[in-house]
């Protein structure tokens, strides 16, 4: 299934949360999440991230904008870790952008934050 179709399907299944995408000026694929990464959402977002990785060329950047995420469960952290590993195997740089303090604290408490490339936007 094409990336746009996977995105549309997710948003249809989750009308109370939104996932949007855009291309940055440099051609990076940016995925903006406005949902909690609990078990159900994480399971449903996994195919979207897999499809996004197929959209990216080697040496590209896949940026996951987390500013709209209020909570992340262990399933959500696993999703992020699995995506990071899959991106690395394809030579794609996976970046977590604008992690909210509560989410950052959870990932840090689990000892996993340091494994990710984390950036803050200049907004």
Image (cartoon, rainbow, N blue to C red):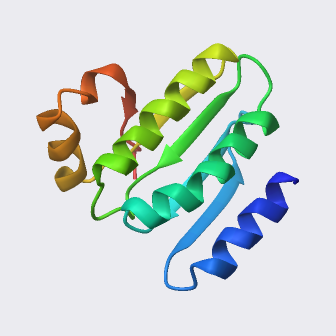
Identify the residue at horizontal 72%, vertical 63% (top origin).
Answer: 7
Residue found at the very far right of the displayed protein: 2
Image quarter of residue 93: top right
Residue 72 vertical placement versus 107 (above, below): below
Whether residue 103 appears in this view of the structure is yes
7 left or right of 81 in image: right
Residue 25 visible in rendering: no
* Residue drawn where x is 37% and y is 49% of the image: 75
- The quarter of the rendered structure image containing the N terminus is bottom right
Name above or below for residue 1 compared with residue 70.
Answer: above
In this view, the residue in front, 75 or 109, is 75
Indicate whether 8 appears above or below 104. Answer: below
Residue 27: image quadrant is: top right
Rendered image quadrant of residue 8: bottom right
Residue 54: x, y in percent? 79, 35
Residue 20 image point, x, y percent = 63, 64
Of 50 and 25, nearer the camera is: 50
6 on left or right of 79: right
User: Is 109 or 93 nearer to us in this picture?
Assistant: 109
Name the residue rendered at 68%, 43% in the picture. Answer: 24
Residue plotted at (26% across, 53% down): 100
Residue 105 vs residue 34: left or right? Answer: left
Residue 74 in picture, x, y percent from top left: 29, 47
Query: How many marks do you count on the picture?
Result: 0
- Residue 59 on image: x %, y %: 71, 17
């Amino acid at each position: 299934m094409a990336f746009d179709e996977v995105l549309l399907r997710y948003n249809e299944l989750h009308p109370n949360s939104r996932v949007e995408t855009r291309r940055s000026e440099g051609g990076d694929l940016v995925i903006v999440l406005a949902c909690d990464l609990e078990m159900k959402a994480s399971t449903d977002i996994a195919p979207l991230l897999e499809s996004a990785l197929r959209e990216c060329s080697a040496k590209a950047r896949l940026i996951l904008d987390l500013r709209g995420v209020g909570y992340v469960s262990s399933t959500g952290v696993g999703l992020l870790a699995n995506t990071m590993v899959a991106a690395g195997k394809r030579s794609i740089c996976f970046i977590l952008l604008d992690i909210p303090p509560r989410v950052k604290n959870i990932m840090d408490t689990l000892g996993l934050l340091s494994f990710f490339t984390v950036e803050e936007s200049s907004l």
